[in-house]
Amino acid sequence: MQVGLLGHGVVGSGVRRIIDGMSNNKTACLCIKRILVKDEIEMVEERMTRNIDDIILDRDIQLVVECMGGKEPAHTFVKRALENGKNVVTSNKKMLASYGDELFALAHQKGVKLLYEASVGGGIPWMAELRRIRRIDEIESFEGIFNGTTNYILSRMEAEGCEFHEMLAQAQSLGYAERDPSDDIDGYDVAYKTALTCLAAFDCFVDPQDIPVSGIRNITKKDMNYANEHGFSIKLLGKGRKKDGILQCSVMPCFVPKGGTFASVPLNYNAISSVSETLGRAVFTGQGAGSLPTAHAVVQDMLDIATGADIADHSITPCCVDESAEVTCYIRGGSIPFPYVAETVDEDTVITVPLSYAKLKELTDNTRGVMVIEVKK
Ligand code: HSE
């Protein structure tokens, strides 16, 4: 199958390396015909182009692989590819979480595939496993570490007592971070992945902006020390649950018990668990960011399309997130009024009574430097 590759950055170059560089012929059914590159990238190969029409209007290209990142022009290019009857594989969670309802409907109408394994969990075959679990079970809930950059920062801060900004710079230099790292550290990257997991697990299309989100930008050694003294690590978790038609999801740093599933997940690794009726709890782990692990997931989708693997379409229902679910929090740096305080840790840190996400937002929004961590009950 002839392929048009959009983007030759961290992920796109990994896809090219896997497909062009395989000595064992395992991807022989795939051939990258054209590569769309940005103005600032030197065109070192004849098949590179700066003109999207060289891919969209090429009738031999049946599969477009989008690894550009960001909402635009990725969204427009993917839409044009689908309109022109091409299958699409994307690693772009931000674009797909924002426009998935439109793009999946278009793919369905055109009778082509739109696959997105690499957009959630990097190299972990998470979407593929959800599809397999759902052949037998309904998914009841999921939770996990969905972001390699923040996991790298948190695990190195915990292990070596390093400062936040030092570790962010390292994660960026290793190619884990987004172009705008605030998507990582403020939790939005996990919100996109949580929204896409709600789609794959529950057929629910959630606007990522409706998911309650809290990030790790303000974390300090003091928070790490508190966790350590109480037998916890701190991990940024995305969660989703659907019961009786009510969807709950959130993105928050959480205290997780040392010795439990999530505490020992190191560096850029992700770990995601699902709960379903007959399988019970299952945990999937692997590298959640980085060139070749993410490219591996992209190439898996490409092979599924090229070999005609049986991949179910989504039926999509737009869903609202229930914000009345309650959460108990450690809050440092906010000014939390008495009725919401269950325990005072010190002069600027409290443990709250259970608060709805809506109340938590009201109490902490626009408070500079505030750090919120979920206390698991
Ligand atoms: N910035 C993302 C992460 C890349 O750190 O997980 C993979 O989605």
Image: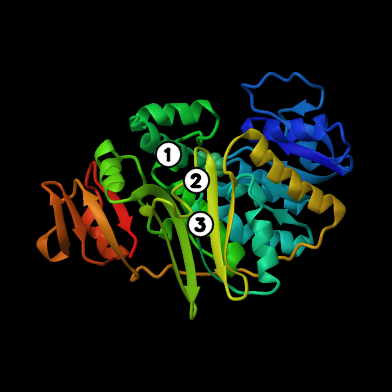
Q: State the residue position of label 2.
A: 265
Q: State the residue position of label 3.
A: 194
Q: Residues within 10 Å of mark 1 (few under 14, many from 20)?
A: many
From the top left corner, tell me how far across and down residue 271 is, in percent.
54, 51
Q: Residues within 10 Å of mark 2 (few under 14, many from 20)?
A: some
Tell me what residue is drawn at x 76 percent, y 34 percent. 18
Is residue 72 visible in the rendered structure shown here?
yes
From the top left corner, tell me how far across and down residue 72 is, in percent.
57, 42
Q: Which amino acid lies under the numbered mark 1 shown in the image of this protein?
A: Ser
Marks 2,3: beta carbons within 8 A = no
How far, Cα to Cα, is label 2 from label 1?
A: 8 Å
Tell me what residue is drawn at x 69 percent, y 39 percent. 295
How far, Cα to Cα, is label 2 from label 3?
A: 19 Å
Locate the C terminus by quadrant. Answer: bottom left
Q: Residues within 10 Å of mark 3 (few under 14, many from 20)?
A: many
Q: Which amino acid lies under the numbered mark 2 shown in the image of this protein?
A: Val
Q: State the residue position of label 1.
A: 155
Q: Nearer the viewer, residue 207 or 223?
A: 223
Q: Nearer the viewer, residue 44 or 265?
A: 265
Locate the N terminus by quadrant. Answer: top right
Q: Is residue 337 left or right of residue 1?
A: left
Q: Secondary structure at mark 1?
A: helix
Q: Classify 94 as above or below 195.
A: above
Residue 137 falls in image quadrant: bottom right
Q: Which amino acid lies under the numbered mark 3 shown in the image of this protein?
A: Thr
